[in-house]
Image (tube, rainbow, N blue to C red):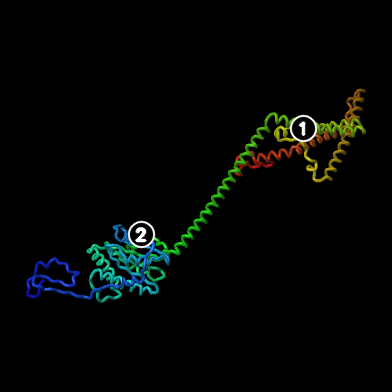
């Protein structure tokens, strides 16, 4: 490439002079100098203004940033979310000012209070200027709103390649994407073709990827997304530690109280189970003792003594009272009472055999059989009057029968009994059956309390474990 009239120099072929400001070729000192406006970004001054003087207690986060920016992992986006006041801007601005060796950082911190258009224009101006500085060129001419985005996206690849030739890695740090800051359109300005480049994105916790982002944009597939913990100074940290200690103590107390309640409940259930098992064992022992042959024989013997004692007392009382009127009437009434006793024995002895040791020979109060004492007196009077009438009728029957015996002895045996004789006989038979029924009823009434008590005990303790599911249903009529 010599001047006019100078032969060409083959040694100039293959020389890459894209980043040169001046170029001299050949032996004849022909020099070509290309001078343009040198771009120097001053954005680090803005970053120094917002960065803290000292970053405290962020060693794990800085180590993670350094590992992400210098590592060879497949992730190209590191997306960090944070609540307001968590110190995201302080962390990222410190990292921009103190990057790891071999890392060139291009950054943009979006301030609050701007419109969406202003944020978009500011992002392009700030980031494009830093990318042009890295490529060593000049700002593109004739930038318009229609071409600025294309130039920005193209400069990402140029800057990444320029850093790679110098043995460095390009990292784009963007902070302040938040729904309250009108930054939804900035996601479309982030690089989508990252060759050896990394992007660190700091957003608010509620920020979501906008719908107009391209479907295959790597931000949609960013698997490295984490919540930044809140930064606390020494006073706040001490207060937080005290609060955490108090919460842990309260939690421990609540856990101890819960454990104590559970232990008390478990102990109560265990005690209830033991008591239920003890009652069941006692009931089984009582049932075994109740149903032995000796216990059944003793219960039958008590029932017989009970019936015989009361029957004998009533016979003696009636015989003494009725013998003053007519000895035959006393005999007939006594026979009727004995019939009632036999009926009572038929009702009481089987029940006493079934109950065994559970039966006690004690009569039920007559007041429980009738509605009131007045009704009891009326029924007693009716029973006594019926007894005396029955005795008188029986005496008349005996007289009539005696007369018939005399007639038969005189040869008049074919005579039919008179109407009075037939009525007296029927009346005597009905009274005898009535006395037997009364005795049977009294026996059932007297044995009723023991039967009910034993039935309730069987329902309550006869089928361990004592649960409502295992308890047998009560049969109708019981």
Question: With 473 as the anchor, is 128 left or right in this view?
Answer: left
Q: Which of 214 and 218 lies nearest the eye of the viewer? A: 218
Q: Which mark is residue 273?
A: none
Question: With 132 as the anchor, is 399 left or right in this view?
Answer: right
Q: Judge whether 143 appears above or below 439 on screen.
A: below
Q: Which of 2 and 142 lies nearest the eye of the viewer? A: 2
Q: Which of 343 and 215 lies nearest the eye of the viewer? A: 215
- Examine the image and state in which quarter residue 175 appears: bottom left
Task: Identify the secondary structure beneath mark 2.
Answer: loop
- Examine the image and state in which quarter residue 214 appears: bottom left
Q: Which mark is residue 345?
A: 1
Q: Judge whether 37 appears above or below 267 on screen.
A: below
- The image position of residue 135, as x and y in percent, is 24, 69
Q: Residue at x 25, y 67 (%)?
A: 159
Query: How many residues crowd around disc 2 within 10 Å: few (fewer than 14), some, or many (20 or more)?
Result: few
- Examine the image and state in which quarter residue 223 appears: bottom left
Q: Residue at x 85, y 35 (%)?
A: 427
Mark 2 lies on residue: 224
Residue 32 visible in the displayed image = yes
Outermost bottom residue: 142
- The image position of residue 61, as x and y in percent, is 36, 61
Alpha carbon separation for disc pair 1 and 2? 96 Å
Q: Quadrant of the C terminus?
A: top right
Q: Quadrant of the N terminus?
A: bottom left
Residue 205 visible in the displayed image = no
Question: With 280 as the anchor, is 93 left or right in this view?
Answer: left
- The image position of residue 109, as x and y in percent, is 35, 70
């Amino acid at each position: 490439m010599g001047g006019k009239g100078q032969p060409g120099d083959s040694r100039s072929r293959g020389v890459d002079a894209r980043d040169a400001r001046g170029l001299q070729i050949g032996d004849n000192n022909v020099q070509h100098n290309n001078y343009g406006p040198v771009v120097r970004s001053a954005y680090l001054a803005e970053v120094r203004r917002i960065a803290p003087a000292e970053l405290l207690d962020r060693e794990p986060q800085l180590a993670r940033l350094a590992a992400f920016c210098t590592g060879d992992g497949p992730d190209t986006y590191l997306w960090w979310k944070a609540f307001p006041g968590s110190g995201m801007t302080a962390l990222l601005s410190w990292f921009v000012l103190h990057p790891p060796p071999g890392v060139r950082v291009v950054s943009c911190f979006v301030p609050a209070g701007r419109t969406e258009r202003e944020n978009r224009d500011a992002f392009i101006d700030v980031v494009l200027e830093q990318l042009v500085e890295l490529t060593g060129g000049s700002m593109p001419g004739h930038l318009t709103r229609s071409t600025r985005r294309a130039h920005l996206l193209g400069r990402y690849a140029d800057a990444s390649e320029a850093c790679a030739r110098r043995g460095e890695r390009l990292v784009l740090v963007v902070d302040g994407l938040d729904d309250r800051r009108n930054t939804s359109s900035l996601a479309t300005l982030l690089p989508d073709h990252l060759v050896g480049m990394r992007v660190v994105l700091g957003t608010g916790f509620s920020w979501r990827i906008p719908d107009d982002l391209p479907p295959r944009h790597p931000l949609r597939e960013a698997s490295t997304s984490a919540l930044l913990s809140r930064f606390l100074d020494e006073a706040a940290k001490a207060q937080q530690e005290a609060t955490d200690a108090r919460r842990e103590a309260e939690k421990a107390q609540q856990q101890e109280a819960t454990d104590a309640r559970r232990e008390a409940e478990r102990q109560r259930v265990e005690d209830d189970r033991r008591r239920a098992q003890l009652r069941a064992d006692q009931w089984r022992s009582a049932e075994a003792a109740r149903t032995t042959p000796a216990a059944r024989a003793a219960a039958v013997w008590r029932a017989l003594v009970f019936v015989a004692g009361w029957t004998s007392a009533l016979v003696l009382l009636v015989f003494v009272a009725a013998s003053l009127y007519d000895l035959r009437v006393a005999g007939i009434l006594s026979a009727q009472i004995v019939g009632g006793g036999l009926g009572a024995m038929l009702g009481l002895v089987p029940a006493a055999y079934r109950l065994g040791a559970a039966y006690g020979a004690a009569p039920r109060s007559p007041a429980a059989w009738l509605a009131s004492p007045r009704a009891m007196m009326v029924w007693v009077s009716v029973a006594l009057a019926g007894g005396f009438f029955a005795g008188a009728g029986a005496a008349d029957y005996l007289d009539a029968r005696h007369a018939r015996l005399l007639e038969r002895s005189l040869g008049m045996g074919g005579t039919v009994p008179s109407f009075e004789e037939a009525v007296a006989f029927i009346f005597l038979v009905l009274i005898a059956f009535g006395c037997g029924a009364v005795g049977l009823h009294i026996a059932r009434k007297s044995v009723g309390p023991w039967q009910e008590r034993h039935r309730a005990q069987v329902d309550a303790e006869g089928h361990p474990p004592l649960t409502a599911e295992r308890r047998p249903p009560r049969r109708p009529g019981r």
